[in-house]
């Protein structure tokens, strides 16, 4: 595992992170590692869109999708 150093963290930000870590019964290191892992696990909107586009591969057009939505709405 690689060590990571973050410089120039504003004092107020550091105080907030320390307080959150303490409330969770964790060290600052353990808490920030958890935050970083969680952030990396969530795809960005662009990543999610690219994944959806790659998985779709069905060759549907926008009009096909809109037609399906309209059909579903009319069936309510």
Image (spheres, rainbow, N blue to C red):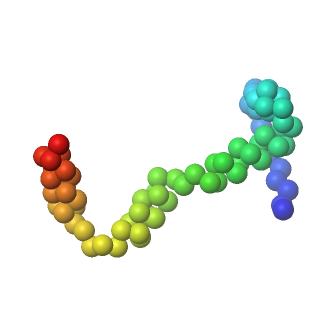
Q: Is residue 14 visible?
A: no
Rendering coords of residue 75 (x, y %): 15, 47
Q: Is residue 42 above or below residue 16?
A: below
Q: Is 75 situated left or right of 24 in this image?
A: left
Front residue of this view, candidates 6 and 48 = 48
Rendering coords of residue 49 (x, y %): 42, 59
Q: Residue furthest left?
A: 74
- What is the quadrant of the C terminus in the image? top left
Q: Is 53 situated left or right of 31 in this image?
A: left
Q: Is residue 76 visible?
A: yes
Residue 14: image quadrant is top right
Query: Which residue is depicted at the point 84% across and 43% down?
Result: 29
Q: Is residue 23 above or below residue 62?
A: above
- What is the quadrant of the N terminus in the image? bottom right
Residue 17: image quadrant is top right
Q: Is residue 32 above or below residue 12?
A: below
Front residue of this view, candidates 74 and 16 = 74
Rendering coords of residue 26 (x, y %): 84, 36
Residue 56: image quadrant is bottom left
Q: Is 15 situated left or right of 76 in this image?
A: right
Query: Which residue is depicted at the point 25% across and 68% down?
Result: 60
Query: Which residue is depicted at the point 47% across and 58% down?
Result: 48
Query: Which residue is depicted at the point 41% across and 63% down?
Result: 52
Rendering coords of residue 71 (x, y %): 15, 53
Total marks shown come to 0
């Amino acid at each position: 595992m690689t060590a990571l150093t973050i410089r120039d963290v504003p004092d107020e930000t550091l105080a907030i992170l320390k307080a959150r870590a303490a409330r969770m019964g964790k060290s600052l290191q353990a808490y920030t590692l958890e935050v970083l892992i969680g952030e990396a696990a969530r795809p960005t909107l662009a990543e999610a869109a690219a994944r959806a586009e790659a998985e779709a591969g069905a060759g549907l057009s926008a009009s096909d999708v809109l037609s399906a939505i309209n059909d579903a709405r009319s069936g309510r």
